[in-house]
């Protein structure tokens, strides 16, 4: 597979003139024709430059990320596009009677952040659930659920998310593999079914009432790709790993099936509003949604075509292979609603999460020697989906966290690429790529495979990474951004929200410092430089979505997706990065958030 860098593709705009000049060298008549072409272009573009802009930003410090080395302090926007970038004097000529002028007073201006991997509606829905992200113990989780139950009618499901047993101050008693037994929760909340999703999203915890409604008991078998944790007597303890979580989730969804269509629509609309508001306040102008159903995509499409999406969405389809085979051809959407919706990727899973012992490893877990994790999708199934992706010109984006999972995905990609040598720029992606064998690091760049990683995961997971993998494997293969970059790979950054906060500033800080709250640094040799980190959140993330000619840098002709920050995160001391705030977010030339 050939691989073209984002820097190379940004030069494509100049090629027509180089080709025209080469074509015209052979005759005077052709020189005349060339002059006519250039004059016509200038009539369309050159004189248009003198028309007033709709929006002008003056007096800032621009990190453009384009190929020019100039220092820029201002930019002009007309419609949804950037029309000029330069110094204040260059740009003031675009100010007319109706131009909005924003004086920036030296603030940093950057391209809009691109959330490279998150779950859009889940972000909104997470704000409607019991937040367990800050809990420090199992007892605190039980107390929060019990307090909610006291103000909730009996029989109503209580839904929470965000707990992580490896971040509690002490392990629960009793526990299996570090996970709590449901007994304490079931005593405290006997009359409400409870479903508590792990921070990773790859495991859930249920009380006795929820298991009763789900029909789960000691006779319930482990489903393919999943596991019910059990006590010494074989009884489920209420912890459901990977696909086993569906046993409880289906019971919850059966209860929700009684909602009316207007109720369901109101809930969806509210989740969308909450997610949109959070993204815009954080400077996220494009959100790469890592897996939505065709029904949800239909909802997004209606909103985009009606001009009702305020954040740009780039969406991966998450459906069964049978549904993909039947309907994939109808869902390739490029730039609907003024480039507010693109659907050109498929999402699949190879394994689970490291924090829940679900990541698929080449060697057993250091803290669970009897397990190498779980493969949640058969390799043959993944290969069939990969062939569908090639047939319909879709990117394939596969969740792989463990080193065995990453190797299997790379092997499938390489095999399908060999079957299609004519496909030279597919840009398939591995989502997360958290733990790699050193042997597989050099494979990404030659295959043209994008590493869609999340900087914030390294510092969030650091408390348990060495425990899971041991020091050797953690150092040589866990969250190895710099090793991948030096090997020529492209990294698209993000947060996997709602697993983590969608805040790009926190993720940027983690990417360039790898500092933990207590001050310890997690394998600092793998830190990104600040420019690498910003590119991974802008231009390289755009490249990972085939959108580098539309966004990702402050370049004339590109979409006017712009963020103004209160501090220059490219130069301030490390600890000041976290104090930076989004002052203004601009999407398509429209100011959609101002602090």
Image (spheres, grey):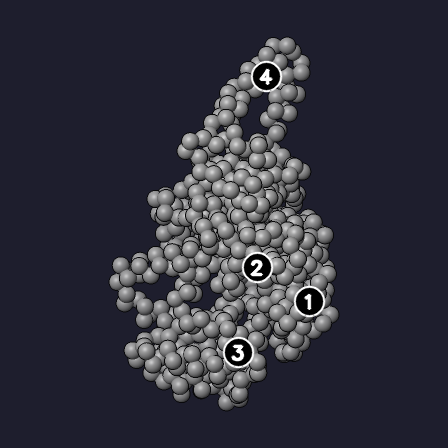
The 10 Å Cα crowd at callout 1, few under 14, some 14 to 19, many 20 or more, is some
- The answer to which image quadrant residue 555 occupies is top right
Tell me the CA gap for discs 4 and 2: 53 Å
According to the image, label 4 marks what residue?
34
Q: Residue at x 45, y 61 (%)?
A: 123
Real-space Cα separation, disc 1 to disc 3, in angstroms: 22 Å
Q: Residue 193, how many percent across, how many down?
A: 36, 78
3 or 2: tag closer to the N-terminus: 3
- Name the residue beneath numbered marker 1: 521
Q: CA distance from mark 4 to mark 3?
A: 71 Å
Pointer 2: what residue? Answer: 579
Describe residue 453's horizontal placement relative to residue 303 as left or right. Answer: right
Of the numbered discs 4 and 2, the one sitting upstream in the chain is 4
In the figure, 431 relative to 205: above or below?
A: above
Disc 2 on helix, strand or loop? loop
For discs 4 and 2, the disc positioned in front in the rendered view? 2
Of tags 2 and 1, the one toward the viewer is: 2
Q: CA distance from mark 1 to mark 4?
A: 59 Å
Q: How many marks?
A: 4
Helix, strand, or loop for circle 3? loop
Looking at the picture, tell me which residue is in the foreground, 383 or 208.
208
Q: Which residue is mark 3?
A: 136
In the image, 514 versus 497, the foreground residue is 514
**Which of the marked residues, 1 or 3, is nearer the chain's N terminus?**
3
- Name the residue at 49% across, 68% down: 201
Q: Is residue 75 above or below residue 224?
A: above
């Amino acid at each position: 597979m050939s691989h073209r860098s984002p820097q190379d593709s940004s030069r494509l705009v100049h090629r027509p003139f180089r080709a025209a000049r080469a074509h015209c060298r052979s005759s005077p008549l052709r020189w005349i024709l060339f002059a006519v072409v250039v004059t016509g272009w200038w009539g369309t573009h050159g004189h248009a430059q003198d028309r007033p802009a709709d929006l002008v930003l003056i007096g800032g410090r621009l990190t453009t990320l384009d190929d020019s080395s100039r220092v820029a302090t201002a930019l002009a926007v007309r419609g949804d596009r950037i029309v000029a970038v330069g110094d204040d004097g260059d740009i003031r000529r675009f100010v007319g009677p109706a131009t909005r002028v924003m004086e920036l007073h030296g603030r940093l201006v950057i391209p809009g952040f691109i959330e490279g991997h998150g779950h859009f509606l889940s972000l909104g829905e997470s704000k409607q659930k019991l937040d367990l992200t800050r809990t420090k113990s199992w007892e605190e989780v039980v107390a929060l659920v019990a307090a909610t139950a006291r103000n909730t009618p009996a029989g109503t499901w209580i839904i929470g998310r965000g707990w992580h047993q490896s971040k509690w101050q002490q392990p629960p008693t009793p526990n299996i593999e570090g996970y709590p037994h449901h007994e304490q929760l079931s005593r405290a909340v006997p009359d409400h079914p409870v479903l508590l999703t792990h921070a990773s999203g790859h495991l859930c915890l249920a009380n006795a009432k929820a298991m009763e409604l789900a029909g789960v008991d000691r006779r319930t078998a482990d489903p393919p790709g999943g596991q019910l944790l059990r006590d010494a007597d074989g009884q489920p303890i209420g912890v459901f790993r990977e696909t086993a979580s569906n046993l409880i989730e289906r019971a919850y969804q059966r209860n929700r099936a009684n909602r009316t269509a207007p109720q369901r629509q109101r809930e969806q609309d509210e989740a969308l509003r909450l997610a949109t508001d959070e993204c815009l306040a954080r400077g996220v102008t494009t959100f790469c949604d890592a897996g939505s159903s065709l029904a949800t995509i239909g909802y997004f499409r209606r909103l985009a075509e009606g001009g009702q999406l305020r954040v740009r969405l780039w969406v991966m389809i998450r459906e069964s292979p049978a549904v993909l085979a039947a309907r994939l051809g109808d869902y390739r959407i490029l730039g609907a609603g003024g480039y507010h919706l693109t659907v050109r990727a498929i999402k699949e899973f190879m394994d689970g999460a490291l924090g829940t012992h679900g990541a698929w490893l080449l060697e057993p877990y250091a803290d669970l020697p009897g397990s190498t994790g779980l493969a949640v999708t058969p390799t043959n199934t993944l290969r069939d989906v990969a062939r569908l992706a090639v047939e319909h010109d879709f990117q394939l984006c596969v969740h792989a966290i463990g080193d065995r999972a990453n190797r299997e995905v790379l092997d499938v990609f390489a095999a399908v690429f060999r079957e299609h040598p004519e496909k030279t720029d597919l840009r398939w992606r591995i989502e997360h790529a958290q733990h790699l064998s050193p042997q597989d690091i050099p494979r990404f760049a030659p295959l043209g495979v994008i590493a869609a990683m999340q900087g914030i995961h390294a510092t969030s997971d650091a408390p348990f990474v060495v425990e899971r993998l041991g020091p050797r494997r953690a150092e040589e293969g866990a969250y190895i951004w710099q090793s991948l970059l030096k090997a020529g790979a492209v990294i698209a950054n993000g947060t996997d929200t709602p697993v983590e906060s969608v805040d790009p500033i926190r993720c940027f800080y983690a990417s360039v410092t790898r500092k933990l709250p207590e001050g310890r640094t997690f394998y600092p040799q793998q830190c990104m430089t600040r420019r690498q980190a910003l590119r991974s959140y802008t231009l390289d993330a755009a490249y990972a979505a085939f959108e580098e000619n539309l966004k990702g840098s402050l370049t004339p002709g590109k979409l006017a997706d712009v963020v103004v920050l209160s501090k220059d995160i490219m130069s301030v001391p490390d600890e000041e990065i976290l104090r930076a705030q989004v002052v203004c977010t601009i999407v398509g030339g429209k100011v959609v958030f101002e602090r």
